[in-house]
Amino acid sequence: MVFDFCRKNLARSIVIVVIVALLAIYAYFKGYRTINQFESKSSQGKKEMSVTKEFFLLAPTAKATATVIFLHGLGDTGSGWSLAFNEFKQKHIRYIFPNAPSIPVTLNHGMVMPAWYDLVAINPRGPEDENGIKKSADKLRELIRKETTDHQIPSNRIVIGGFSMGGALALYTALTHPEQLGGVIALSSYLPLNEQFKTGKVSLQNQKCNIFQGHGDMDPMVAPDFGKATHQILKAGRSSLGASTELKMYPNCGHSSCDDELDDVKNIINKWLPEI
């Protein structure tokens, strides 16, 4: 009896130690989870997903002829979006999901979290972190250039996009980028530093690529009217370009992406970046 009691207690102790160790390992690696469980179904057995501290990558299973770069929102990482895009990826496209650096965010009382720039307010007339926006735009531009130089992807075969803050950065970067891009997908987003575009300080005529905005009509974070105001700025400034500037509202959708929106994103990418 004593032996059985001791053995049971020893087993419990071992289980507790293992659980504590696993929790510690999880906490340490939480910010840099890999997704190596997704293995290619091809005979070569190549991994479909890989990750660094800078980005998650969905690698193509055929020759890469296009790239999609998609930026997450405030407080997030590229992981979740890489899983969403994994459901409808195309074999000829490189999908890159960068991770934002962790910085203090004024809107969240200085809490340190992943963010592309500091956020003070979410409204068309609020103060903005111009230096932070431009710094992150330069980093995104460098990633675009690496795709053209390292992987021989023409800039007009590169689509950039994002959700919320990520979509805002994608819009700003595209509209100030010197080379023509394949398109912009901005979900639940807005145009940062919009006064510079409205006043003509920054021209909306330089970037002739198509732009798609998706927005939930019940978004409590980035108000639908903010998305509509962005659309009006883009439409007015780009009307003579012959490029599509589309805004689609999704009923009963909040600050998130619904299935219908993801289906539209899939179809848009397939249309803009067909296999060649």
Image: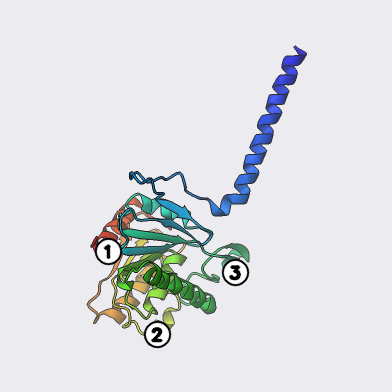
Q: What percent of the width, then of the height, locates residue 164?
A: 44, 64
Q: What percent of the width, then of the height, locates residue 130?
A: 51, 79
Quadrant (top left, top right, bottom left, bottom right) of the N terminus: top right
Instruction: Pick whichever, 39 or 217, lies toward us.
Output: 39
Decide: is 200 above or below 99. Answer: below
| Quarter of image, res 182 | bottom left
Residue at image location 46% in from the left, 66% down from the top: 165
Instruction: Please name the residue that numbered disc 1 is placed on.
Output: 273
As helix, strand or loop, the secondary structure at mark 2 comes to loop
Quadrant (top left, top right, bottom left, bottom right) of the C terminus: bottom left
Residue lying farthest to the front in this orientation:
44
Residue lying farthest to the right in this orientation:
2
Check residue 202 in the rendering and tell me which mark sits there, or answer none.
2
Q: Are marks 3 and 1 in contact (CB under 8 Å)?
A: no
| Quarter of image, res 59 | bottom left
Locate residue 110 relative to residue 66 in the image: left or right: right
N-terminal of the two: label 2 or label 3? 3
Is any part of residue 72 visible from this angle? no
**Residue type indicated by callout 1:** Leu
Q: Label 2: few (<14), some or many (≥20) within 10 Å?
A: some
Q: Label 3: few (<14), some or many (≥20) within 10 Å?
A: few
**Residue type indicated by callout 2:** Val
Instruction: Pick whichever, 78 or 120, lies toward us.
Output: 78
Check residue 146 in the rendering and tell me which mark sits there, or answer none.
none
Decide: is 238 above or below 27. Answer: below
Residue at image location 51% in from the left, 68% down from the top: 116
| Quarter of image, res 118 | bottom right
